[in-house]
Image: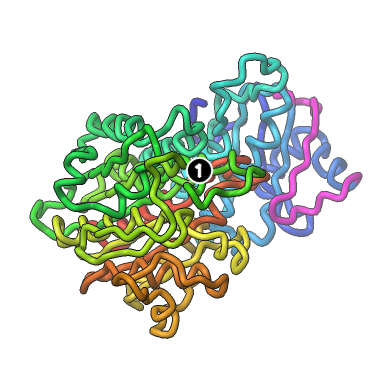
Amino acid sequence: MKIAFAGPGVPKAGTIVVGVADDRTLTAPAAALDRQTGGALTRAMTASRFTGKRDQFLSILAPANLSAGRVLLAGLGKLDAVDALQLEALGGGVHAQLAATGETEAAVLLDGLDLPKIAADRAAAAVAFGCRLRSYRFDKYRTRLESDKKPALAKLTVHGPAAAAAKKAFATLDAVADGVFETRDLVSEPGNVVYPETLAAQARELESLGVEVEVLDEKKLQKLGAGALLAVGRGSARPPRLIVLRWQGAKDKDAAPVAFVGKGITFDTGGISIKPAGGMEDMKWDMAGAGAVIGALKALAGRKAKANVVGIVAAAENMPDGNATRPGDIVASLSGQTIEINNTDAEGRLVLADALSYVQERFKPSAVIDLATLTGAIIIALGHEQAGLFSNDDELAAKLQAAGAAVGERLWRMPLADGYNKLIDSDAADVKNISGSRDAGSVVAAQFLQRFVKDTKWAHLDIAGMAWATKDSATVPKGATAFGVRLLDRFVADTAET
């Protein structure tokens, strides 16, 4: 979809989108159109339940005295409360309203709209950003999709008083959208297409943006002593990979980087502790944490972020065969700690353990943030509204929560405590990978990860409830959400850029 910005004006074709505030209060561009159409907008509102509340829409077909085919009224609610997130939702809503109508172009009129909480250029960029985010589709394997079910909207123009500045602001957001789409693509792909080797190949494509990419194969992992990661992949014909991505955007190339670590289980059967058959097809997205790390690096490189960032992806396929790790096996991790694996379906924490050790030892990061679809227990606790946040540092946790709130990827902080930690003490090894109880499952998993964190500031994001959406929302169509990409990008922008 082509996105453009223009000064004030009324287009002569397509759909014209204008805002209406609470109590059917017409904004300046809406009032001008109402006069031009002989009061058609006011009459349409009066004849409907449309009142201008936030997220309401009302379509008016073929209004008099306009060559445009449609006017779309968009509810804004109280204008003094409108912010970037609401305008992104407006852009997403415009796409949702028009995608199925056959409309090919639309124009959003923002000139004369006084929004105290956001500048005119940022407002225009946010509308365009939301529309692009909602436009995502994963149709590559659909060979018989009827043409009338394909979105036709090909162009969006946002009109306002700061077109040049809006275009510049959108360029940054457009790079973030590229990262979001990268992650959605990776997470949407089936396990026969995305597996450790192909995930590494996809990561290498970021080299064209200036990202340094290194891939450690099974021989290098064996030499390193990454026994936990290798144990997860033993039952698969697809060998594990550790993927290292580096973006050196800071002026001081030797400055300690921020590190992101992603769980990359490209398909999870549960291994010998095999999952039930029902719903197992969803386990293609057990690499959503890894996808978010790759997407975040693409976003940061695309917008030339002035920060040093390292991304680590621990990729493996968890399958059962005669060579697979058995419940009760004991392996040595990269850190030197031994792990008793009492459940092979608690595999994500194993690959992350070696990845956490690796990134701390090699890169000495200022902070480490891992993302993982780690536990079903976090869905029981938080549903699909927020991801779980665990951290050993209050300041880091607060900054992550602030970044998440700013972009609509919310986090809820969960506890860490010695009582939970004792639940994974093993009688036979240094630590066991499950507690043996269903109690506090997501907390126990986080406590396991913390055993592999030294003195580094660390946060763990359990995104199991947020990686996949079963219904559309404002800027996220049904399917892979790319949760974490925008959050990490905003965190870097707020805390790490020089």
**Seen from this angle, which residue lies furthest bottom?**
419
Percent coordinates x, y for residue 206 in the rendering: 28, 34
- Picture quadrant where residue 392 is located: bottom left
Give the residue displayed 46% in from the left and 59% down from the top. Answer: 343
Q: Is residue 61 magenta?
A: yes
Q: For this view, does 10 lie left or right of residue 420?
A: right
Residue 112 in sight from this viewpoint: no
Q: Amino acid at mark 1?
A: Trp
* Disc 1, SS: helix
Percent coordinates x, y for residue 430 in the rendering: 29, 72
**Seen from this angle, which residue lies furthest front?**
322
Q: Is 85 drawn above or below residue 218 in the view shown? A: below
Percent coordinates x, y for residue 9 in the rendering: 57, 32
Give neighbour class at mark 1: few <14, some 14-19, many 20+ (Cα, 10 Å).
many
- Residue indicated by mark 1: 285
Residue 55 in sight from this viewpoint: yes
Q: Main secondary structure of the magenta part?
A: loop
- Which region of the structure is painted magenta? 47-69
Q: For this view, does 300 lie left or right of residue 498?
A: right
Give the residue displayed 18% in from the left and 47% down from the top. Answer: 249
